[in-house]
Amino acid sequence: MDRLELIKRNVQEIVTEEELTQLLETKEHPTAYVGYEPSGKIHMGHVLTVNKLLDLQKAGFKITVLLADVHAYLNQKGTLEQVREIADYNKRCFIALGLDPKETNFVYGSDYQLSSEYMLNVLKLTRLTSLNRARRSMDEVGRQMDDPKVSQMVYPIMQAIDIAMLGVDVAVGGIDQRKIHMLAREGLPSIGFPAPLCIHTPIILGFDGNKMSSSNDNFISVDDTEEQINAKMKKAFCPAGEVENNPVLELFRYHICPRYEEVVFKRPEKFGGDLHCRSYGELEQVYASGQLHPMDLKSGAALYMNMILETVRSVI
């Protein structure tokens, strides 16, 4: 897989591909970042962007991870002390998932977001951003947006200034971050900063077939026990032969197959014996054809997810 293919793997959108190609041609080691609001357990939705950071590192990018404790505070996720404690936990999880602390720049928002230079740039951008635009930017990521606080209107402005002050070429995030990233692309040049490229990963389904949500408890957390993962997989929505909107197959596409060159499904000989798949595309074809039963797919997913997360459990 070449450099560009690696960057584009499992990505929903790049804004824009032309700019990315130019960046790769002109800069040997571009820079990229993801900001994580420390607000609870790290689940496989978060890990999707971690996987993309790992791809970018392999492609020669220098990576910054923003542990956005001030953002979490503004978004009603706890006191500054509480969110800083969660941020420390999140950092340990990200390192256990493969982000080398020697190669990754971990930054706490509170380390620089309270400086006069930062706040002046925030105020400059607030003068250019309508209240409606700020609210629309927060619709996908804000808490209690039926009655938003002023702090939540400042949140997307700060996220744009983060990109500027961290000096990164590329902002990475889930597609739910798109409105905030577009605000940054449009607003930052007006106050003297370059517009960032944006790489957006998809929003994956929860195991009940609905949007992944902590309130629905329909996700795998990185600190789930082996027994918890096995139980969740047994109950997971997994229609036979269907590859679209299948949350179990999404685990293979986004988390398992990128880490393993081959996946093996253990089966008795009377059910066809062990089945080997050397790519996600091959697995999808096998499942769509009915050669692999949903329970075998679920069992395989549980096996590999437990293997992936074993290193995380051992350090957190």
Image (cartoon, rainbow, N blue to C red):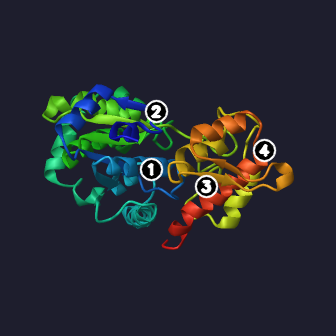
Q: Is residue 284 left or right of residue 145?
A: right
* Residue nearest the observer in this picture, 59 or 20: 59
Q: Residue at x 47, y 56 (%)?
A: 39
The secondary element bearing badge 2 is classed as loop
Do the CB atoms of the residues marked 1 and 3 lie less than 8 Å apart?
Answer: no
How packed is label 2: few (under 14 Cα within 10 Å), some, or many (20 or more)? Answer: few
> What is the distance, in whole Å, between disc 1 and disc 4 at their CAs?
28 Å
Three-letter amino acid code of the residue under disc 1 = Asn
Question: On the rendered structure, is 166 left or right of 40?
Answer: left
Which numbered disc covers residue 220? 3
Residue that numbered label 1 is attached to: 51
x, y percentage for residue 128? 22, 28
Front disc: 3 or 2 = 2
Distance between the alpha carbons at the discs numbered 1 and 2: 14 Å
Secondary structure beneath disc 3?
Answer: loop
Distance from Cα at disc 4 to Cα at disc 3: 22 Å
* Residue type at numbered disc 4: His
Nearest the eye: 164 or 30 = 30
Image spot of residue 33 (x, y percent): 31, 48
Q: Secondary structure at mark 1?
A: helix
Q: Considering the numbered disc 4 on the image, is that residue within a helix, a strand or a loop?
A: loop
Sequence order check, earlier mark of 1 and 2: 2
Above or below 57: residue 312: below
- Residue receiving disc 2: 12
Callout 3 amino acid: Ile
First in sequence: mark 3 vs mark 2: 2
